[in-house]
Amino acid sequence: MDKTFSIDRFEEDLAVLVSQDGGTFPVLARFLPSDAREGDLVALQAGKWTILRTETEKLREKLFDLQESLFDE
């Protein structure tokens, strides 16, 4: 089972997570790290949600580069 998810959005006390296959499911936001934000990649490790900071930064850089390439044309 894939255990890496992206935080899509927060709705009141819930965080909506998206799996790599596109499935979504809610998690109580209080179970995520307090500094978690939309777009962060997270994983459930040993029963605790963890922000994958390196992977999140790489993804943000990739998306920024893609956006830049679209506007440079």
Image (cartoon, rainbow, N blue to C red):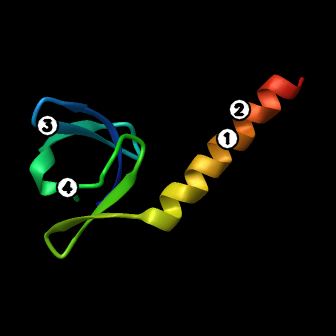
> What kind of residue is marked 4?
Leu
Residue placed most toward the observer, 4 or 11:
11
Quarter of the image containing the C terminus? top right
Q: Residue furthest front?
A: 35
- On the picture, is 46 further left or further right than 37? left
Residue 25, position in %: x, y? Answer: 20, 38
Residue placed most toward the observer, 34 or 72:
34
> What kind of residue is marked 2?
Gln
State the CA–CA distance, disc 1 to disc 4. 25 Å
Which of the labelled discs sits on residue 64, or is there none?
1
> What kind of residue is marked 3?
Leu
Q: Residue furthest bottom?
A: 46
Which mark is first along the chain, 4 or 1? Answer: 4
Which mark is first along the chain, 3 or 1? Answer: 3
Q: Secondary structure at mark 1?
A: helix
State the CA–CA distance, disc 4 to disc 2. 29 Å
Please report contact status of discs 2 and 1: CB closer than 8 Å, yes or no. yes
- On the picture, is 18 further left or further right than 49? right
Q: Which residue is mark 2?
A: 67
Q: Which residue is mark 3?
A: 14
State the CA–CA distance, disc 2 to disc 1. 5 Å
Q: Which residue is mark 4?
A: 32
Q: Quadrant of residue 47?
A: bottom left
